[in-house]
Image: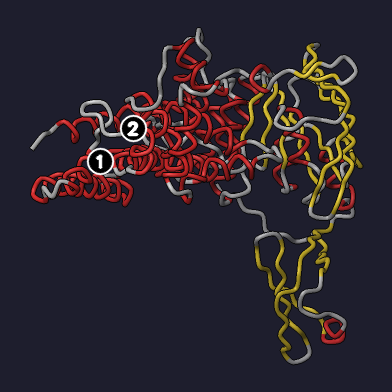
Amino acid sequence: MDWGPIILTLKLATVTTILLAVIGIPIANWLANTKTRLKPVLEALISMPLVLPPTVLGFYLLIAFSPNNAFGEWLDHWLGLRLIFSFEGLVFASIIYSLPFMVHPIQAGLSNLPKSLTEASYVLGKSKFKTLTKVLLPNIKPALLTGVVLSFAHTMGEFGVVLMIGGNIPGQTKVASIAIYDEVESLNYAVANSYSLILLGITFTILILVYMFNRGGMKGFWK
Amino acid sequence: MIELQLNKVLNSNHGKMHLEIDLRLASGTFTAIQGKSGAGKTSLLRLIAGLMQPDGGQIEVDGKSWFNSSQQIDLPIQQRKVGYVFQDYALFPNMSVGENLRFALSKHDSTSIVDDLIEIMELGELRNHKPEILSGGQKQRVALARALVQKPSLLLLDEPLSALDNEIRAKLQQHLLELHKEFNLTILMVTHDNGETLKLADSLVVLEQGRVIEEGKPSALLTSSNISGKFQFTGEIVNMQAEGVISILTVLVGKELIKVVSERDEAENLSIGDKVLVASKAFNPIIQRIN
């Protein structure tokens, strides 16, 4: 069995999760505090990947990033980025695809904190950034953990988007879920089974860990 | 000297209310604010701290303008030298007592003020505890100490003692008096308790419907009606019991239940739930120290 697809999957999930944390926390914080009338629209946009078939997202990304149209050409020409059939493209698509899994738990965690914590920090002369990093985020560790782990697990399980814009290039875009499909197509059921079992094991372990941490069994560790 | 001229339209449960406050507080004074709930007491504190924005007016503290609508000055909350003790204490759950206090330090402050405050407020033993396991009175002491780390020009207290039982309350009132003297603080405190006002405050402001309706010495405002040498309390009848020619009424005064005797025909005009005034001549009271 070739370990390449498994390693690529873990690499994709790790890179995506790190970038999602960087992007998702500010978005969640903004959504938790904003009073703009556009909020429902933005929330709907972020939640879309929850219900939209991944192939739809993949299809539009494929159209957008194709070097045959203006935007794709611009990316290619000015930034040297070619987002279809490349690892970078998968990362980009995964970020959009898993965004709700990062944003929702963190937004809920922040909204549930008493408003007075933020206000007390401001009155004590602390900036918005310091309030977020030193007061708010440390008090929603379970939500942060949930966000990080769900994004990671969700990215690992992605298939449709990858199939549409990634293709099946070993070491570049051939992630485990694609490899399984590939092996089944070639009737290599034993190899497909190995990949499947590994994915099953990893996702199950991750989810068990989240539920254990958030149940309070590991309270001493987090507080 | 602190000068306030503030107006703001507040949206409350009972519709719109116009808050219009014009107040002057001398430096180093302890002012109590009283008034019914919804009178605008907490809003006043929040406007001063910058947690709420006035529609117009000005706030000037020791010659420095914090807010001035005509000159478009609106100092950010962070830059207002104000201490604020929230009703729910707002201690940071992820930090120990000591860390909560140190968090309030500015970059170049020496940490000695934290040690001083921990000593004054008797928090030494709790220093490494998380707020979660503290009692209400202990949390309140931490919140007070934390508000003072920055040596604010003005300390705002939003019913700081209302959730505490009488004994702890008395002790914290003592702490507040000491802090007031020690740091020469200007304090503005929302309270419902007349006794607390008499014990702590130099002046009293009574709000109603967003306006100041009375302002003066607490002793003058709160005791004027008692000069005839009577005790009088207002309360609510929670129970009535007929016993021969008399009726025994149970009246809820503040948080205490008292039983009073009334004549049968007097009681006939009363029913459970009535607000009543209970008054008695004070010619033979029992007075005992309680601490």
The answer to which of A53 and B111 lies nearer the viewer is A53
Percent coordinates x, y for residue B186 in the rendering: 72, 24
The answer for which chain carries disc 2 is A
Residue A111, position as x, y percentages in the image: 55, 43
Q: CA distance from mark 1 to mark 2?
A: 10 Å
In the image, residue A205 above or below residue B4: below
| Quarter where residue B286 is shown | bottom right
Residue at 84% in and 16% down: B72
Considering the image in quadrants, where does the C terminus of chain A appear?
top left
* Residue in the image at 28% along x and 41% along y: A220
Residue B121 in view (yes/no): no
Query: What is the x, y in percent for residue B36?
Result: 80, 51
Which residue position holds label 1?
A: A178
Residue A200 falls left or right of residue B197: left
Callouts 1 and 2 close, C-beta under 8 Å: yes
| Kind of residue at badge 2 | Gly
